[in-house]
Image (cartoon, rainbow, N blue to C red):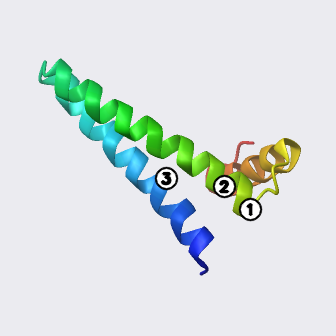
Amino acid sequence: MDLGQIVTLWTARLSAVFYLVALVQILRHMGSSARILWTIGLIIYVIHVCCAFTYFYDWSHGLAYRETARQTANLFGVN
């Protein structure tokens, strides 16, 4: 795996972790910390999208759409 693939993979994972922790904080009624965690997760997600388009899709939305549909179909049977 090259550096672009690693960064893309880990930014997806980190954004999901921050999102889940923010949801837990929301359920615990800790709004201010939830907002900070949610914002950090969003920023990491935007970095993930930029990495994915740079390293995998050559900034082609059509290619990204088709590849995401293919991967979803492989995992869940639905594109």
* Image x and y of residue 18, in percent: 32, 42
Q: Residue at x 21, y 23 (%)?
A: 26
Q: Earlier in the sequence, mark 2 or mark 3?
A: 3
Q: Residue at x 83, y 48 (%)?
A: 66
Which is more toward the observer, 75 or 19? 19
Q: Earlier in the sequence, mark 3 or mark 1?
A: 3
For label 3, the SS is: helix
**Amino acid residing under circle 1:** Phe
Q: Which mark is residue 56?
A: 1
**Amino acid residing under circle 3:** Ala
Can you identify the residue that label 3 sits on?
12
Residue 21 lies left or right of residue 72; in this view the side is left
**Quarter assignment of residue 36:** top left
Give me the C-alpha separation between circle 3 and circle 1.
Answer: 14 Å
- Mark 3 crowd level (few <14, some 14–19, many ≥20, 10 Å Cα): some
Q: Which mark is residue 21?
A: none
Can you identify the residue that label 2 sits on?
52
Q: Residue at x 78, y 48 (%)?
A: 64
Labels 2 & 1 near each other (Cβ < 8 A): yes
* Image x and y of residue 38, in percent: 34, 31
Residue 77 lies left or right of residue 9; in this view the side is right
**Quarter assignment of residue 21:** top left
Image quadrant occupied by the C terminus: top right
